[in-house]
Image (tube, coloured by chain):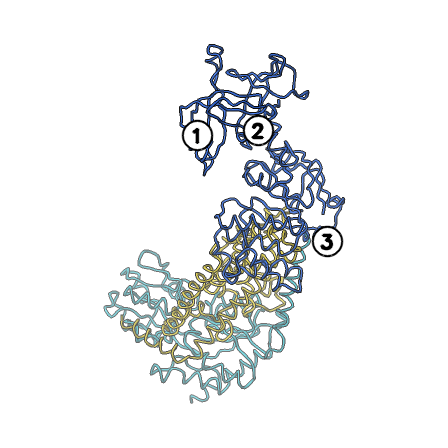
Chain colours: A yellow, B blue, C cyan
Amino acid sequence: MQNILNALNRALGLIISLDKEVFSIVLLSFSVSLTAVFFSSLFSLPLSLLLALKKFRGSRFIVNTINSLMAVPAVAVGLVIYLLISRRGPLGVLGLLYTPWAMIFAQALLATPIITSLSLQTLKRIGSMVRETAVSLGASGWQMVITILKEAKSSLMAAFIVGFARVIGETGMTMMVGGNIKGATRVMTTAIALETMKGDFELAVALGIILLTVAFLLNIFLQMVQGFGQTR
Amino acid sequence: MNIKAEKICKSFNGKEVLRSIDIEIAESRINCVIGPNGAGKTTLFKILTLLDKATSGEVYFDGSPSSLLSPEEKLNLRRRIGMVMQNPFMFNTSVWKNVAYGLKLRKDRNIAGKVEKALKIVELYSIKEQSALTLSSGEAQRVALARAMVLEPEILFLDEPMANLDPLSTKIIEGLILKMENEHNATIVMATHNLLQARRFGERVFVLRQGEIIQQGRAEEVFHYPSSSFAAEFMEVGNLFRGRLIIEEGTQKLDLGRIKVEVVPNSEFGKIGASVFATLRPEDILLSLEPFHSSARNSFLGEIRNMQDRGGIIWVTMEPIPRFSGSKAESTSTPFVAVITKRSQEEMGLKVGMRVYFTFKASCVNVFE
Amino acid sequence: MIILVAMAVSYLLLSVIILILARRGKEPQLILATTTSVQDSGLLDVLLPPFEEKDKCRVKVIGVGSGQAIRLAKEGNVDVILLHDPIGEEIFVKEGYGVTRYNIMYNDFVIVGPDEDTAHIRGGREGAKALKKIAASKSTFISRGNDSGTHRKEGELWRVAGIEPSGSWYIEAGTGMVGTLRIANEMRAYILTDRGTYLAHRKELNLTILVQGDENLYNLYSIIPLSKEKYPHVNYLLAMKLVEFITGIEGQDIIRTYGQKEYGEPLFFPLSISGLIEEE
C-alpha cells in the first residue's frame, strides 16, 4: 500500500511540475493519434458519403467488409503493418519501422473502419431526410452534399471522437510498429506498459492519470456533441 | 409553367403504386388531388416535381419531356417549382436560416428583405432566431411554406399542408394559399384527404385511388356528381343508394324498395331494369312538418331515427315511411340524411322519433352505374 | 467504381509522399536493439547522450528479448545490437549478419531467493549445483521463459546440471527481468537474475543473493554492428563510431561509474582494453 501511495504522490508531483518527459510523451500521443484520425477521416468521409448517397453494384459488399473490419484486433493490424514496412517487406525501403509515421499509419488503419461505419450510419439517416428537402428547394448535387454534411456535423464529430479514443488508448500494435523508443516513439500507452514492467511506477502512474483523464474528457465531449445533434 | 403527365406508372420493389396516370395541372388555379392515405398522392407529387423518376410514362414541362432534359435544365426547373412536404424537414438552425436556405442556394441579392417579409406573412417573425427543431408541427409547416414561398415559385405543390395542424396555423396557411392564388396568380397543387378543404379550395379536382385517377374535373362537377361509388363514399356525398331503374306512370324512377324516387331521364345510364347507384346531397333535402307542395317531384314522409350535431349543423337521419302500408313495408331500410341548421331544428322542434316530410328535386339525384 | 479507385490511389500516393518527406532533413540516426535488462538498467540513458552530442546524431534504442533482438537484426530493421548472449552472437557473426563482436562490459548473474531458503543453496558458488538442489526440493523457481539472455543462461545451467526442469514448481513467466523478479517476490520463489537489475530494485524486493561468483554465472555484453554488405541501408559508419565511443575511455568510464551513487555498487564492469588499462 505504501508503495502505491508513494508512487501516486510522486506521480502527482510530476504532473504538477509539468515534467518534461511526461508531457513530451503526452504530446507525442496526441500528435500521433490526431494525425492518424485526420488521415483516416480523409479516406472515411468521402467513402461514407459515397456509400450513403449513391447506390451502385458492390456497395453492399463494401459496407459489409467495412463492418467486418471493425472486428479485426489491433495486434493483427500491427502485424500486417510490421510485415509491410520491415526492411524485408515490400515497403521496407521507406524505412518506416520504429518511426512515429509507422504508428500513425497503423492507427489510421485501425480507426478507419470504425469512423467509416459510424459516419455511414449517420449520413444515411440524415441524407435521406435532407435530400428531398434540399433538392426541392433547388439544391444542386454539391449543394445538397454540403447541406447534408452541415446537418450531420455533430454526429460526424462523434464518429471522429470514437475513432480517436480507440487509437489513443491502443498499446500492443503501437508498440510493435513504433518500438517504444524513448523520445521518439514512446506514447502514453506504451510508456505505461514499459514503466510498469520496469517498476518505475511514478512515471507510469502519472501517465495513467493523464490517460484516464483524457478518456474521461473524451467521453464527456462525446456526450455533449451527441446532445447537439439530438433534438430530432 | 405547364406541367402535364402522360401514362405515368411507378413501382417500388415490384409493387405498383401509380398506374397509367394522365394529369394536366390547371395553371393559375388551385388544383386538388384528393384520395385516401396510400393512394399515391405523395409519389405522384414527387414525380411531377422532378424529385423522383417514373418507372414509365412521361412528364412534360412546358412541352419538354423530362427524360430529355439535362441535369442543369432539371435544376432550373426545380428552382421554379416549389414543394412543401408532409411533416417537413427542418434544418438544424434558426427559423430565419431555414427560410433563407433556398435563397442562399440561388445566391439571391436580397435575402434579408425577402425572408423578413415571408416570416411576417406566416406570423413567425417574432421567433426568427429560435431553433427550428423546437417548433410545433404547425409552426414547422408554416416555416416550410415560407421557405418555399420566398422563392416565388411558378407552381407550388403542397402535400397535405393542413394535416394535424392547430387552428391558428390552419387559418394562416389557408389564408396564405388563397392569397397566393388571388394576388400572385400562382398555380397551386394541393394533396389532401380532407374533403372540406378540397371543396373549399379546389377549382380543379383529381380523385386518386390506389394509383389511378378515377375522376377529374371542375370541383362542382366532381363533388356533386361523383362518377363511382368509391368516389361517392370517399367524398361523403351523404346519401348513397342502390336500386333498380323502372318506369312508373310514364316517368323514370329509382326503385329503392320502400319508396320509389323520381329521377331525371338520362340516356347515359343503362336500360330500364338495370341495377344502379344514386347519390343525393344532404343539403338538397328540405324538411317540413307539413306536406310541402312545390315543383319538387320527390316528397316523402320519414321518421327521424338519428340526429347528429356537427358544430351548429344538424345531420338528420330518417327512414322513409311507405305511403301505402303493406307495399313492401318490410323491405330493407334506406335511410336518408339531410342537413339543417340548429336554429331550424329548434324552431321546428325536431326530435328523434318524430315524423317529418322530406322533399328534394329529381334533378338532385345523381345516378350512375 | 471509378471514384473509389481514384480515392484509394490518391490516398496511397498521399501517404507515400508524406512518408518520404518525413524522412528528409533529419539528423543521422542509429537504431540499436538491446535486451530489456540493459534498457531497464538505465545505463544507456547515461551512456548515449554524450555520444549523441559529440557526433550530432540520434540513437534510438529498442529493448526486446535477446533472441528477438537477433531476429530483428536479421530482418535488417536495426543498425547495431548490444547483447549478452555470446553463443547466439557468435553464430550471428559467423553467418555474416554482423561484422564483429566487440566486448564492452560484463556483470554477473546471481540466484536470489527468499531468506528462508528451503532448498539450502545459500553461500554456494556454482549455479548448476544450486539449481540441482532447487529441483530436488521442488522449491518454486521462476524462469524468464522468453528466450532472453537471462533465459538462455538459465538454460545453460540446467544443461550443466543435467536436468530438464518441469513440474508445478517450475514457472515460466513471459515478463521482463523486473516483472519476473516481482513474481518471484510475490511467490517467495528462487530466480536467476543479473546483478544489475537486482541491485536496481533491491529496495522493493524481499529477496537475498544466495548464490554468486561462479564463472558460469558471468554475463558478457558485446556490441555488434550489422554488416553493410548484407544490409546496404545500415549506417555502418555511425555504428562504428558508437563502438569506438563505448569501448573508448569516455564510454568505459561511464560504464565503470554507473550505479555507484544510486545503488552503492556499480552495475557493470568495463571490459575493453582502455577500460582495463584504467583499472590498473
Kindly identify which numbered label has been placed on residue C63.
none
**Residue B251: % across, % down:** 62, 15
- State which quarter of the image contains the N terminus of chain A: bottom left
- Packing grade of label 2 (10 A; few <14, some 14-19, many >=20) is few
* Chain identifier of the residue bearing label 3 in the image: B
Q: CA distance from mark 2 to mark 1?
A: 35 Å
Q: Amino acid at mark 1?
A: Met
Point 43% across, 62% down: residue: A219
Would residue C178 be found to the left or right of residue C187 on screen? right
Give the residue number, with chain letter if any, for mark 3. Answer: B72
Q: Closer to the camera, C210 or C204?
A: C204
Q: Nearer the viewer, mark 3 or mark 2?
A: 2
Q: Which mark is residue B348?
A: 1
Specify the label residue B230 is tagged with.
Answer: 2
In whole angstroms, how far apart are the C-alphas of marks 3 and 2? 42 Å
Tell me which numbered mark, 3 or 2, is placed earlier along the sequence.
Answer: 3
Disc 2: host chain: B
